[in-house]
Amino acid sequence: RRRVSPGAGTGLLPPVTPQLSLPSPGTTTAFKTPQSFATEYDGVTRTKVTIPLVFPVAGRTSWSDTFLASRGGGTRRHHGQDLMTPKMTRLVACFDGTVRVSRNGLGGNALYIYGANGWYAYYAHINNDTPGTDDGRADPRYVFAPGIKNGVRVKAGQFVAYAGDSGNAENTGAHLHFELHKNGAVVNAAPSLARAQKLAAPRPGAPILPELLPSVGAE
């Protein structure tokens, strides 16, 4: 059994039926998940699990279940879900937890949220461009939300970063690559995302840069 780095990876699974009732995000609710999962060679488990989430993109998005789809010319499997959304769309914490930020070759600018629920979420392809460009030279304020750094605690629905196309997403369109992990296994996030609470805007927390707010009369 081998652990793999988050973001390393999407074939399609059969349709997923949510297994658990979904309480209101932000509440503390007891729900049962296995303490360990049977995993395949790349850390994937086919155990079907649904956990309470706030949808990690606040705003317009589209997605379909691409868990385990072939990637890298067949050299690896997709370990997450790609949530397509315009650059600079605000990303929010999917559950309460502690943040770690990173950068890696596939995921580019990335964020981990280690949840109080024992799970962790991985956010990849966070913005790396100056707004309105594809220059790969974003000022740090256009990458993560103000105050987001290693060790910071966040609440579900709090603004944490901006969507983009960093890493190996430069030619695929801006999106958030989103994964869920527990005890060394990566699970299909589709059933949790399908039942997640969607927000039109982040909950109060980190401020939004004034120049990124819509102008009066703008869509």
Image (cartoon, helix red, strand yellow):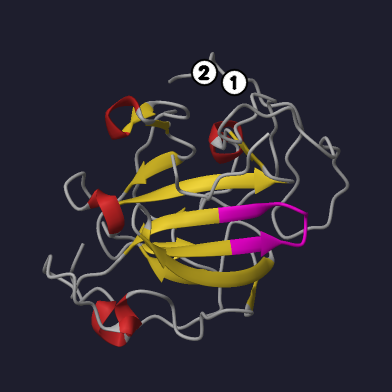
Q: Is residue 199 visible?
A: no
Q: Position of residue 64 (x, y in %)?
A: 40, 30
Q: Amino acid at mark 2?
A: Leu
- Answer above or below: position of 50 versus 26: above
- Answer above or below: position of 114 versus 151: above
Task: Please give the label number shown on residue 13.
Answer: 2
Magenta span covers which residues? 113-121
Q: Is residue 158 visible?
A: yes
Q: Are marks 2 and 1 in contact (CB under 8 Å)?
A: yes
Q: Residues within 10 Å of mark 2 (few under 14, many from 20)?
A: few
Residue under the point 46% across and 27% down: 68
Q: Residues within 10 Å of mark 1 (few under 14, many from 20)?
A: some
Element class at badge 1: loop
Q: Amino acid at mark 1?
A: Val
Task: Please give the label number shown on residue 16.
Answer: 1
Task: Please give the label number shown on residue 200.
Answer: none
Q: CA distance from mark 2 to mark 1?
A: 8 Å
Residue lying farthest to the top in this orientation: 14
Residue lying farthest to the front in this orientation: 1
The quarter of the displayed image where residue 112 is located: bottom right
Q: Position of residue 13 (x, y in %)?
A: 52, 18
Compared across the picture, whether 102 is left or right of 181 comes to left
For the C terminus, which image quadrant?
bottom left
For residue 154: magenta? no
Q: Position of residue 62 (x, y in %)?
A: 34, 39
